[in-house]
Each structure stands twice: as structure tokens, then as C-alpha cells.
Image (cartoon, rainbow, N blue to C red):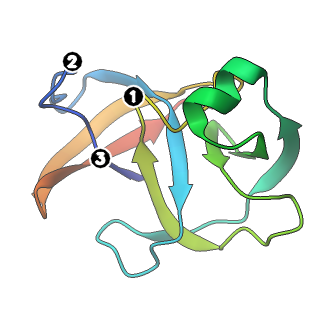
Amino acid sequence: MSLAGWEVDCCQHLPEVGDPVGRPLEWHDLPDAPGAFDIRWSTRAVTLSRDDARVVGVDAGLVLGRGGLRAWWPAPAADPVPRRGLLVVQAHVGVPSIVPDTRGRATGVEGVDGGWLVGIDVVH
């Protein structure tokens, strides 16, 4: 599994292979991006708390899950979730507190288009 968008310029270090990683994730409809993949998500519609809604910018969305992966999809439950896309790390804004971090171990780190793709083995 590949994750993109590590905020290495801010408060997080770039992991090395074998390092434990855990980050809040958001699913993006980017089917042609480096690291994009296909997945069938289970979904749970949620209404956000006032604090989360203020930070995230919406008051409802979907918590996505598959095995040990958890991600946020900021769209109404009636909107289809794309099957192909990219998981993006959102360390400061974008993912409400109701979505647990996805955790695992780094299997590879690759620079791509001014960002980083970090391969991980996800803990189930």
C-alpha cells in the first residue's frame, strides 16, 4: 500500500524502511497519480462534531475501512466512493478526529512530484 503527502517539512520526520508509521488518511479521487490503487471500501456515514466540522470544512462524510486501513471521504453518503484513488496523509487538517490513524511499518520511501510516496505494511 502506498501513502502520499507526508508533511516532512513541518513537524514529522520522513520514515526509513522498517520504521513504525501511523497517520490520519484521506481518500482522493486521483486514479492516475503515482501510487494510485484499486480498493473496495466498507463505509460508515458520520455527522461531525462542531469542532471537527470547523477544522475539516464539512459537517458530514464517510469513514472508509478495509482491513487495517481507515480513511476519510468528505462527501455525502449518497455520492459514490471512487474505487481507484490515492491515500493522502493529512496531519493537521482534513481528517476528523473520529477517523483512527492507519498504522504499519514503512517498506519504502520514494520522492515523487515534490512529495513522498511511503510504502507500508498495514497492521490489521
Residue position for label 1? 91
Secondary element type, mark 3: loop
Residue type, mark 3 in image: Gly
Numbered label attached to residue 115: none
Q: Which of marks 2 and 1 is nearer the N terminus?
A: 2
Q: In the rendering, at what x and y percent does residue 54 appear?
A: 63, 29
Residue type, mark 2 in image: Cys
Horizontal side of residue 115 vs 19, given as left or right:
left
Residue position for label 2? 11
Secondary element type, mark 2: loop
Q: Which of marks 1 and 3 is nearer the N terminus?
A: 3
**Which residue lies at the image location 18% right of the left edge and 33% below the top edge?**
17
Quarter placement of the C terminus: top right
Q: In the rendering, at what x and y percent does residue 102 appear?
A: 53, 31
Query: Considering depth in this image, is 59 or 35 the residue closer to the camera?
Result: 59
Residue position for label 3? 5
